[in-house]
Amino acid sequence: MSSLIEFREVCKYYQMGDTTVKAADRISFQIQKGEFVAIVGQSGSGKSTCMNIIGCLDVPTSGTYLLDGQDVDQMDKNQLAAIRNKMLGFIFQQYNLLPKLTLQENVEVPLMYAGVPKPERHERSRIALEMVGLGDKLKHKPMQLSGGQQQRVSIARALAGDPAVILADEPTGALDSHTGREVLTMLQQLHAAGNTVVLITHDNSIAVQAQRIIRLEDGHVIYDGDASAPEAVVTPNLAGRGAAG
Amino acid sequence: MNLVETFQMAVQNILSSKMRTFLTMLGIIIGVCAVIVIVGLGNGMQGYIEDSFADMGTDSLTVTIAGRGSSRTVSEEEMYQLVEDNSETFKQISPTVTMSGSVKIGSDSLTATSVTGVSEDYFNMKGYEIAQGRGLQYTDMTGRKKVCVVGQYLNQYYYGGAAVGQTLKVGGTTFTIVGVMAAEASELEEGGTDDCVFVPYSTAARLSFTGTVSSYTITVQDTDQIAEAKTTLESALYAIFEDDDAYTVGSMAEMVEEMNSMVNMIIYILAGIAAISLVVGGIGIMNIMLVSVTERTREIGIRKALGARESAIMRQFVIEAATTSSLGGVLGIALGFGLSAAATVVIANVMPDTPITVSPSIAAVLIAFDVSAGIGIAFGYLPAKKAAVLNPIDALRYD
C-alpha cells in the first residue's frame, strides 16, 4: 500500500541575485495514513518550504511529491486549489480567520469552495465547532475570542472539510504555554481519532508531542524517526561534535 | 460557490464599509443622475415642440415661389390644377398672402395682429371653426371683395363680442368683418393664434406690392405620406421652373423633425459630457478596488489556501465592483428622477410660458443601469485580476 505523503528527492531552489539558495535539497520521506509527524528545524532549515510543498501551496523545482498516490508537481493552479480544498486542512500560527465573517462562516469557507450546498455546510460547520467546544459561539466574530479559542476555530475549519492530512504550521506559536498545550492535546486527540497530522515547528518541546520527528537542517533531512528517541531532540551539530570528540 | 453566494458576499463586504462605498459610488451616482436629467430634459423639450406645432398642422406643406427671372412664374390656376391632378396625394390648396400693413380698429393701431390672404378652403384645411357670421367664400375671391374674418381675440377685446358687420383698416384699406373664428388657443392673447385677420387672397394680392401670389399651403391626404407628397410637389415644380432655386417646399412635420433632431443633437452632446463623469466614477471604483485588494491580500491568501480557485477570487472582486457601481447606478437613477421632478416644478415657475415636463425615459434608465454595471465589471477587472494571481504563500505572509 502506498504512503499518504511521499517525498522523492524533492528539491526547491530559489534564485537570490547570483546565488542559488537550496531551500530543500533532495529531501525524501514517507508519511503513512494515521501518523502524527512533527517536521522540526530552525528558521532557514527548509521546514517552511516542506510545509508549502506538502500543503500544495508550492511545487518542487525537481523531485516528486506524491499525495495519496497523485503526482502533485505536474498539476496546474486550479488542480492544486482543488487538492488543497479536498485533501488538506490548514492550521496556521496566526489562525488566519477572516475577521468580517462569523465563526460558522469561517468554518464554512473551504466547504463553500468545495461546492457543498448551504444546509449541509451549516450542519457540518456546527458539528466541527461543537467538536472544538465552541458550539455556543457560532455567530460570534473572531475578534470576540481569545487566541486559544481562535486557534480552535481554525482547527474546526481544518476538520470541517474532512481532509486526508491536517497540516499545522506552528499552531502554538502565538499562544501562551497553557493554551498551547490545550491545542496540542487537541491535535493528539485528532491523531487518536485516526487523522493524519503533520506538525511543523521549531520548538523541540512541541515536536516531542508527536509520534515521529523529521528534523531538517539546511534543506536536508538529518533525523527521521521515533519522537521519544534521545537523538530526536539533540541539535545535530552538537551531536556531530560529540561523536567526533 | 455560486453567483448568488458571491453576490451575497459582495453585499456583505460593501455594507461593512458604508462610507467608503458611498464615496466610491459618488462618481457613478452623479454621472447617471446627470445623464437621466439631461435626457429627460430633452424628452420634455421634444414634447413641448411637438405640442406647440401640432395645432399648426403637421399635415400641410408650404410652397414658396421665388420665380425665375421675371418671365417664368406659376399662376394660382396652375397650382390648383397641380393639386387636382394629384388628388390621391393632395387634399386641398390655399394661396397664402401675408400682408404687412398694420391693422387699425377705430383709433387703435394693432402691430402684433397677423393679416393673411387666404382662399375659402383655408379654414377647412386648418380646422378653424367659424363662431359668428360666415367664412370667406368663392365669390369673395373672384370679386376681390374687401371683407374679412377676424380671430376671437379681436372680437372679444375690440368689438365686445359683436365684430360681425363692423369694419377695420389694413394699411389704409377698409374691410368689412363678415365672420368671427372660434377661439383656437386656450388663452386669448396679443400676437397669439386668435389675434388674426383673414382676407380673400385675391384682395390681398392686389393690395400687396407685387400683385402676385407667392406662397401656398397644401394639405395632404395622409400625414404619413407627407415626405412622398413633398417629393411629388417638388418634381412638379421642377418641371415648370427647371431650377430648384425657384421654389421651396417646406412641411411643418419636417420642421418639427428638424428641430427635434437639433434638440437631440444637443442632448446627445450634453449626455456625452455627463457620461464622462461615469468614466471618472469607474476609475474611482478601480482605484478603491486596487486599495481593497492590497488591504485584503491576507484574506485572499487564506481563501486560496483553503481551496479558492483563481476564478473564484476573480469573480468575487469583479462582482463586488459591479455591485458597487450598479448600486451607484440605482441611487443615481433615483436621484435623477427626484431632480427631474424638481426641475419640472422649477421650470413651470420660472418660465410659465414654456411648461417643459422633464420626463426620464425608461430606455435612459435601462441604459444608465447597464452602463454603470458594465463600468463596474470593466474597471473591476484589473484589480480582480491582480487579486486572483496573488501567490498564496506571499499573500499569507502579508501583514
Image (cartoon, rainbow, N blue to C red):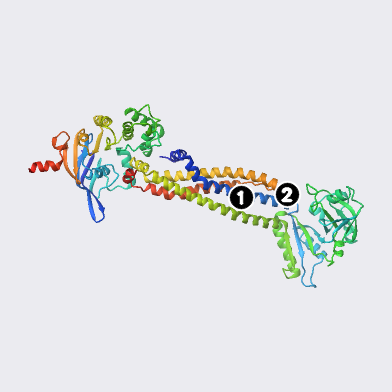
Q: Residue at x 56, y 54 (%)?
A: B273
Q: For mark 2, does the 10 Å Cα neighbourhood hold few (<14), some (14 to 19), or many (20 or more) residues?
A: few
Q: Secondary structure at mark 1?
A: helix
Residue tagged 2: B353
Residue A92 picture location, percent across and down: 30, 38
> Seen in the image, is B345 located left or right of residue A57?
right
Residue B380 picture location, percent across and down: 45, 48
Question: In whole angstroms, how far apart are the C-alphas of marks 1 and 2?
Answer: 21 Å
Under mark 1, the amino acid is Val
The residue marked by circle 2 belongs to what chain? B
Q: Is residue B328 above or below residue A116?
A: below
Label at residue B253: none
Residue A193 visible? The answer is no
Q: Residue at x 43, y 49 (%)?
A: B381
Label at residue B39: 1
Under mark 2, the amino acid is Asp
